[in-house]
Amino acid sequence: MSAPSQPSIVDILSDAYARLNRAAWIVAIPLVLNVALWYGPAVSFAPLLNQSAQLLRDMQPDDAPESTAELRQIRDQTITVLEELGSDDMRPQLAWLNAVPYTIYGFRAGGASADAVGLPFINAQPAKIDPTTAIWVEGFGDVARSFLVVNVVGLFMTALYLLLVSGSVRESVPMDEFGGKLLLTMGRLLLYALTITAIAVVLLIPLSIFTFLLISLNPAFGAFVLLAGSAIWLWAGIYLGFTRELMVLNDYGPFQAIRASITLVRTSFWRVVSFVGVLLVVVAGIGIVLAGMIGTQAGLIGAIIVSAYLMSGISVARMRFVQLHQGASTVHIA
């Protein structure tokens, strides 16, 4: 007797949207996030960055004895980068703990977790800063407060979102113990983010210094090492890519979920690569369509609604993929 065939990626996506249609309240979370990003007050680092740019000008004036064309070029390039950052809304850059998909700021794959193939974010276009409502960050204390507020909100929304997504996959939402699970999930997501950040700091800082020295000594070899390091980081991201889903779906701690994600990818590598590849293509296509919609107010509203639905379906599909390939329990926990 032949073994039952695994569902195709199309089957998983179809099943995911069918489940989402039965639990449409999930869409409310990315919908609220998108509305807040488009219509809420932006966070601008322009005052702080302008101070940094002026400091560079004061430290390296054109008439300084040590000034050279090369130093002036580096100074001007740095100032240009600072000025460009000053025109950006920094909320998405601050939100390292957010994994709720949003639509309006360029492609980004799961900030805090450093998952190379985490929950995707649609590539559309940045929202412009409204100077009449923007929150201006003028000092490092303001940066710390902004970072804290944005990430507390992002962590709460992420935990709530993933619990509701897992409920659609389990076909049950444990409302009697939901509050406790929400707090536990927030703690686990935070611990996971801190673990990955610590590993990245320990490894990337010395490796970055080493690569910079290599590039200065041998640009070709240094570029090769940089490319190889990026490939390794992508490879690690693939193996860690389902950690959040496993934490929520199987009630795992972060370290157990990391091991389970590595095992899942190792035992179903080509299925994982195919599945993630299809999702990235789908998201890229969605981004192209939505980028063409947001030129008008009506189109923007439509894009916000459509993207919240489509991206929530992809989130459910990721969770469903994990359930099918990792053997997660489907017992109701209500």
Image (cartoon, helix red, strand yellow):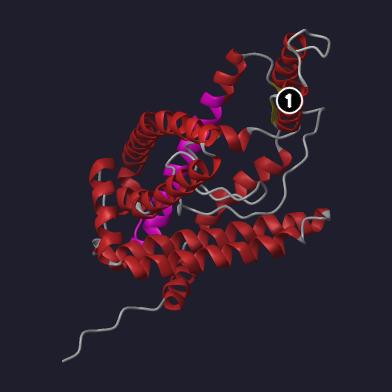
Give the magenta part as a residue range: 147-174
Q: Nearer the viewer, residue 4 or 177?
A: 4
Q: Quadrant of residue 331?
A: bottom left
Q: Residue furthest front?
A: 218
Judge left or right: residue 297 versus residue 17. Answer: right
Q: Is 113 situated above or below 295?
A: above
Q: Quadrant of residue 325?
A: bottom left
Residue matched to label 1: 70
226 inside magenta stretch:
no
Quarter of the picture containing the C terminus is: bottom left
Q: Measured from the top left, where is residue 176 in percent x and y?
A: 31, 46
Residue type, mark 1 in image: Glu
Give the SS element for disc 1.
Answer: helix
Q: Measured from the top left, where is residue 11 in percent x and y?
A: 43, 78
Is there any visible trace of residue 21 in the rendered image?
no
The residue at 44%/43% (across/down) is 114
157 inside magenta stretch:
yes
Q: Nearer the viewer, residue 275 or 91?
A: 275
Quarter of the picture containing the N terminus is: bottom left
Q: Nearer the viewer, residue 108 or 311?
A: 108
The residue at 58%/62% (across/down) is 283
